[in-house]
Image (cartoon, rainbow, N blue to C red):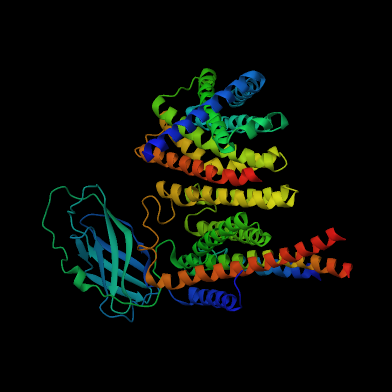
């Protein structure tokens, strides 16, 4: 009886979060210029890297991918928080449970980051001709990497919005925290490019999942305290 | 006067290297690399001293402030 | 933070003990050098051995062995003693050695009654071994021959030599940095629970002392690396993770100085402090254990606590951690007292 009750509540929660994610998407499509700006930023970065390096080999492809991914993530997540935290949207936050809203936002950012990184991979492959060989590992790396990065960046973005809306503070705080995720992503991507043959790939994936869980748990625990500030 | 001291310090620091420059083993690597441990301990002392010096200066500022107020 | 004077005195006494014992206790006797390192099978090897802290001349029952594996052990036929630190041992290397590789690797063991036995791994390489098996008279009662001497001395390790004493400063400072950061974490949680300004001051001062300790850890590690691994900075995973950890806490410092509003500042820095500590856990404890590293306890290297940290080292290493932590707490106590006074003065100015 009790478990059924719990299940119903979980279902309701998931439905609410789902509807919130849909709302986020609608909001973003109303302001298409933000999405286009992020896309343009990404393609410009790829093009600059391509022209600067000239001939890009798999090793530098890997490094460039992770660096551009990082900056695209920084940009898009900071935008999604700073633009919407003005008075126009305040009613929106008083209407919903803030924690649910935050989770919805982070998940939305995760999906956005995954799509962006796949687009980034396509554009980089288009320019440089270096292709991913093992798509399974690549998708695992992108999915798990973006999950941790999006939760972490969302939390830090909220924190920096609270601290006089300072975007320099955001990048300073956010960059060192995600370094372990980026290092693991580099390793997994290197495997998917067949740069290295990694026998302990499962261990790396489990570790990545563990770090993601750690970040998700700490952001969800710390969020109410940050929100009350 | 200050210049003299600085020169003296530099001579003290460089002199051991000059002695051992001719031999195969340099000064720090002699006697089982013991002088690298000495360097580490000196560094620890230096770090703590600099940290305490900065604290000391801050407290001096505070003292000055109190004096001015009263 | 802690009442009374006793813990400050304890910190000073422990640190003094570490400085004195860390330098005065000698290293165990060991083999510093052995040459030549390469020999062909079937020849007679005149191995000149340089000892460290050894008593070859005055010691009795001096023997030397070459150990290829647990059964194939060769005893020196003749030993010529030159001085306390130098001997020349003669081995008759057999034509045939049972090994899977082309080159057989031998561990050199020198044993006497005063010093006990000392080991030098991979001292001699024997090449051009004959392929046809033949009977060799190996020394079988090898283990009974060795002398076990229990002296109060630190272990002798090749390449490390005396720098093993850096354990009491370099490794201990990392441990006490972690303890200080845990203290800062506790104070941050306390601040968020009680909103008492005191806890924020404690957290800030503990974190700044922790950062100074961490910077010293990096700098001392660089010196140690220079004289054992050859360079100040390597791409070793633990080193770089420690550097990233420092970046994390430097960001904490920048966050604090960037916020004007005081209440907001204390709160956000407390939240970030907790976040940074959680981010530190994978950096320092998880990732280095999964990747190859030059540090002990990582990848294929033996762990700290196994052969690397013997009982004599422990007797100085643990007091070093406690002593350095207490000193760190003392300094943070001074910092927090300064901050409290500054706070009082600022409040007075605001009233005026």
Residue for point 81% across, 69% down: B63
Residue at screen point 49% across, 33% down: A13
- Tell me: residue C199, above or below residue A151: below
Query: x and y percent of residue A209 in the render?
Result: 43, 39
Task: Examine the image and state in which quarter residue C122 appears.
Answer: bottom left
* Foreground residue among A151 and C237: A151
Could you tell whether C40 is left or right of C170 in the image?
left
Whole-percent x and y of residue A24? 59, 25
The quadrant of the image that shows the N terminus of chain C is bottom right
Name above or below for residue C184 compared with residue C113.
Answer: above
What residue is drawn where x is 16% and y is 69%?
C141
Q: Position of residue C200 (x, y in %)?
A: 65, 58
Q: Looking at the picture, how far across and down is residue C299, in whole percent?
A: 38, 50
Residue A193 shows in this picture: no
For this rendering, which residue is in front, A1 or C96? A1
Residue C282 in sight? yes
Residue at 47% across, 55% down: C229
| Quadrant (top left/top right/bottom left/bottom right) for the C terminus of chain C | bottom right
User: Would residue A189 appear left or right of C352 to someone viewing this image?
Assistant: left
């Amino acid at each position: 009886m009790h478990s059924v009750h719990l299940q119903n509540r979980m279902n309701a929660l998931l439905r609410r979060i789902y509807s919130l994610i849909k709302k986020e998407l609608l909001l973003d499509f109303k302001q298409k210029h933000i999405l286009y700006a992020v896309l343009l930023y990404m393609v410009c970065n790829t093009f600059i890297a391509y022209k600067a390096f000239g001939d890009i080999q798999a090793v530098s492809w890997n490094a460039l991918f992770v660096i551009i991914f990082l900056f695209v993530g920084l940009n898009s997540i900071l935008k999604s928080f700073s633009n919407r935290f003005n008075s126009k949207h305040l009613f929106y936050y008083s209407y919903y449970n803030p924690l649910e809203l935050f989770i919805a936002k982070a998940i939305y950012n995760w999906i956005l980051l995954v799509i962006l990184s796949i687009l980034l991979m396509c554009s980089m492959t288009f320019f440089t001709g270096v292709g991913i060989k093992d798509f399974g590992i690549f998708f695992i790396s992108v999915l798990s990497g973006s999950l941790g990065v999006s939760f972490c960046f969302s939390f830090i973005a909220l924190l920096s919005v609270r601290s006089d809306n300072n975007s320099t503070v955001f990048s300073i705080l956010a960059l060192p925290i995600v370094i372990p995720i980026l290092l693991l992503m580099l390793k997994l991507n290197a495997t998917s490019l067949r740069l290295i043959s990694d026998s302990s790939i499962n261990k790396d994936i489990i570790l990545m999942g563990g770090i993601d869980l750690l970040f998700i748990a700490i952001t969800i625990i710390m969020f109410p305290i940050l929100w009350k500030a | 006067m200050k210049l003299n001291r600085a020169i003296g310090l530099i001579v003290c620091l460089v002199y051991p290297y000059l002695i051992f420059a001719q031999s195969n083993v340099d000064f720090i690597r002699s006697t089982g690399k013991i002088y690298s441990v000495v360097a580490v301990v000196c560094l620890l002392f230096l770090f703590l001293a600099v940290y305490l010096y900065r604290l000391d200066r801050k407290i001096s500022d505070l003292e000055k402030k109190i004096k001015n107020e009263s | 933070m802690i009442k009374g004077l006793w813990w400050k005195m304890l910190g000073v006494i422990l640190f003094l003990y570490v400085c004195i014992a860390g330098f005065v206790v000698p290293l165990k006797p060991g083999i510093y050098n052995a040459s030549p390192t390469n020999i062909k099978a079937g020849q007679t090897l005149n191995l000149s051995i340089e000892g460290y802290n050894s008593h070859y001349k005055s010691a009795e029952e001096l023997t030397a062995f070459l150990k290829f594996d647990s059964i194939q052990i060769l005893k020196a036929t003749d030993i010529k003693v030159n001085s306390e630190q130098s001997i020349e041992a003669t081995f008759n290397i057999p034509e045939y050695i049972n090994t899977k590789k082309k080159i057989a690797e031998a561990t050199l063991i020198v044993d006497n009654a005063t010093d006990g036995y000392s080991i030098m791994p991979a001292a001699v390489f024997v090449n051009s071994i004959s392929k046809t098996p033949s009977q060799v008279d190996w020394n079988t009662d090898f283990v009974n021959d060795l002398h076990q001497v229990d002296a109060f001395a630190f272990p002798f390790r090749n390449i490390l030599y005396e720098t093993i004493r850096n354990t009491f400063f370099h490794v201990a400072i990392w441990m006490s940095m972690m303890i200080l950061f845990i203290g800062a974490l506790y104070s941050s949680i306390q601040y968020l629970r009680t909103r008492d300004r005191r806890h924020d001051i404690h957290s800030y001062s503990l974190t700044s002392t922790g950062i100074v300790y961490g910077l010293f850890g990096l700098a001392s590690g660089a010196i140690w690396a220079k004289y054992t691994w050859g360079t100040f900075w390597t791409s070793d995973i633990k080193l770089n993770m420690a550097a990233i950890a420092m970046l994390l806490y430097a960001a904490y410092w920048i966050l604090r100085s960037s916020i004007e509003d005081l209440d907001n500042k204390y709160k956000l820095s407390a939240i970030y402090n907790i976040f940074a500590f959680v981010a530190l856990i994978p950096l320092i404890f998880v990732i280095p254990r999964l990747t190859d590293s030059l540090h002990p306890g990582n990848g294929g290297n033996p762990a700290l606590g196994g052969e690397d940290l013997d009982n004599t080292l422990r007797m100085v290493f643990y007091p070093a951690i406690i002593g350095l932590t207490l000193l760190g707490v003392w300094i943070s106590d001074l910092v927090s007292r300064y901050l409290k006074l500054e706070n009082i003065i600022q409040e007075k100015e605001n009233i005026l």
